[in-house]
Image: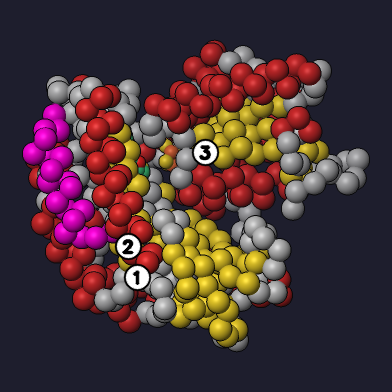
């Protein structure tokens, strides 16, 4: 989809995306909203008439990156003789608002995550130098309703947003402030979008939400009745022709209900991979984080999920060095990791975020202590990840082929457990599910031999 705009009337669009999958999805929707206005993606910001920086506010480093990127864009804008329009979208836009324009006057537009459908109107206003350059109202229902209903697929996998926002207010986290209150999309709209993706060759969808398993979207109109849960939604979407794999992310332990757990056992399309962040293994710290569950409650959920789907791979997120974290608290996290055994996990040093309750707490730790603990945890997680990948050697796995590999004749794809798999095979396999016998494993990927091509079940 990228390249130089072919017709004169086309305008160049460059979108830089930071942060989570929700931002990746939103950037695609921004592209969709702008297509009817004649904007076509270009490969470098220098060639763009409009640059959108879709930002992340989750940790201090993420926010800092935005300002340095904006500094570079300012120079490009000057070199373009002012032709370039710079828009800042996403969570930093929501959190900083007008401050962004004050700190970097080259910024033309600032729009929060709930305002993307207003972008065409904002661009029109900016070109006439009239009106507001800022849209940071929360209006999620309007956003879900106003974005184009059809989408252009980009390969055999796609994100589908089903829920947005968060009411959990973990004490370290900016998301409830940047994304607003929890809201779920209508099942009918999700089905429509998924069907349109399936008809374009999408085989695997990942349902997205900041708290995706808190999903409670209005039931299909023809069925009526109560709002649906995520378990119901997954079962329903698995019946759409062409959709062979369903994933969801990111979920919260408190919303891991019995129905969703049993869906893992009775819905083959639901992939055996669960990203369930726990953040800490210490009950004291979990309480201070306002997570609303204990470490044992989490262990119990994982045990029940494993009972429903014995081969399920578990992933998580951890925060190291939350204010007041003692050696014993950290050891409790290490113990939880040993008990669960993760396929993959993401760990971060606690970053104090302005306006969050944890920023005001006592007992902030030094970077040295945080670094030491993070290294110890990451060492253990790397061991587990390597071990998990190695445990696939000798097995035959169904792999969804997602593209060409680095070397000629090589293809790559995804295992059910979300591992990258490399194997020798023709390009014609792209988008198909094939059986690959795993012959090698490393920390980040598997290598295998092509055994058989499965017919897509349509
Ligand atoms: N909704 C998801 C998480 C979204 S943020 C959930 O509840 O799990 C993604 C991850 O960033 C979090 O799981 C957490 O591990 C990390 N994170 C969030 N705020 C952070 C902060 N202030 N410092 C360090 N890591 C943070
Ligand atoms: Fe942030 Fe907690 Fe909400 Fe996740 S559940 S987005 S960590 S406040
Ligand atoms: Fe970042 Fe916002 Fe996602 S803060 S992690 S882009 S919800």
* Marks 1 & 2, CB-CB < 8 Å contact: yes
Would residue 148 be counted in the magenta stretch?
Answer: no
Neighbour tally class for label 3: few under 14, some 14-19, many 20 plus, Cα within 10 Å: many
Q: Residue at x 63, y 72 (%)?
A: 424
Secondary structure state at the residue bearing disc 3:
loop
Cα distance, mark 1 to mark 2? 6 Å
- Which secondary structure class fits the magenta region best? helix
Image quadrant where residue 86 sits = top right
Q: Residue at x 34, y 70 (%)?
A: 391
Q: Position of residue 39 (x, y in %)?
A: 76, 42
Neighbour tally class for label 2: few under 14, some 14-19, many 20 plus, Cα within 10 Å: some
- Left or right of residue 113: residue 184: left
Q: Quadrant of the C terminus?
A: bottom right
Q: Is mark 3 within 8 Å of ligand 3?
A: yes
Number of the front mark, 3 or 2: 2
Q: Which residues are magenta?
A: 324-343
- Left or right of residue 95: residue 147: right
Secondary structure state at the residue bearing disc 1:
loop
Cα distance, mark 1 to mark 3? 33 Å
Q: Position of residue 229 (x, y in %)?
A: 33, 66
Residue at the spot of label 2: 387
Cα distance, mark 3 to mark 2? 30 Å
Mark 3 or mark 1, which is nearer the start of the sequence?
3
Q: Is residue 408 visible?
A: yes
Q: Is mark 1 within 8 Å of ligand 1?
A: no
Q: Which mark is residue 391?
A: 1
């Amino acid at each position: 989809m990228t390249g130089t705009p072919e017709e004169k009337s086309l305008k160049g669009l460059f979108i830089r995306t930071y942060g989570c999958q929700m931002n990746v999805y939103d950037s695609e929707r921004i592209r969709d909203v702008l297509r009817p206005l004649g904007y076509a993606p270009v490969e470098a910001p220098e060639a763009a008439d409009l640059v959108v920086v879709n930002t992340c506010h989750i940790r201090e480093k993420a926010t800092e990156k935005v300002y340095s990127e904006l500094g570079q864009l300012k120079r490009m804008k000057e070199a373009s003789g002012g032709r370039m329009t710079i828009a800042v979208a996403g969570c930093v836009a929501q959190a900083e608002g007008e401050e962004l324009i004050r700190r970097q006057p080259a910024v033309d537009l600032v729009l929060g995550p709930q305002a993307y459908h207003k972008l065409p109107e904002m661009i029109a206003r900016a070109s006439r130098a009239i009106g507001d350059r800022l849209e940071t109202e929360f209006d999620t229902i309007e956003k879900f309703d106003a974005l184009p209903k059809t989408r252009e697929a980009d390969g055999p996998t796609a994100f589908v947003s089903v829920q947005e926002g968060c009411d959990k207010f973990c004490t370290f986290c900016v998301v409830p402030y940047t994304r607003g209150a929890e809201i779920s999309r209508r099942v009918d709209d999700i089905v429509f979008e998924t069907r349109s993706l399936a008809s374009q060759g999408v085989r695997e969808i990942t349902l997205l939400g900041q708290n995706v398993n808190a999903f409670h979207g209005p039931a299909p109109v023809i069925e009526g009745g109560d709002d649906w849960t995520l378990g119901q939604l997954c079962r329903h979407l698995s019946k759409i022709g062409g959709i062979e794999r369903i994933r969801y992310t990111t979920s919260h332990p408190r919303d891991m209900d019995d129905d969703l757990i049993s869906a893992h056992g009775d819905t083959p399309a639901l992939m055996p991979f669960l990203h369930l962040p726990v953040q800490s293994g210490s009950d004291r710290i979990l309480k201070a984080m306002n997570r609303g569950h204990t470490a044992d409650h989490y262990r119990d959920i994982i045990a029940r999920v494993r009972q429903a789907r014995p081969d399920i791979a578990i992933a998580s997120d951890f925060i190291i060095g939350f204010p007041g974290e003692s050696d014993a608290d950290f050891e409790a996290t290490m113990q939880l990791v040993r008990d669960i055994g993760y396929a993959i996990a993401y760990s971060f040093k606690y970053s104090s975020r302005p306006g969050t309750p944890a920023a005001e707490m006592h007992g902030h730790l030094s970077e040295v202590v945080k670094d030491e603990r993070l290294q110890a945890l990451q060492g253990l997680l790397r061991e587990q990840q390597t071990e998990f990948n190695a445990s696939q050697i000798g097995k035959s796995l169904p792999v969804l082929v997602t593209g060409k590999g680095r070397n000629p004749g090589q293809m790559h794809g995804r295992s059910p457990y979300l591992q990258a798999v490399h194997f020798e095979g023709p390009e014609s396999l792209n988008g198909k599910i094939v059986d690959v016998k795993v012959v090698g494993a490393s920390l980040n990927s598997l290598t295998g031999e092509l055994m058989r091509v499965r017919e897509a079940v349509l």
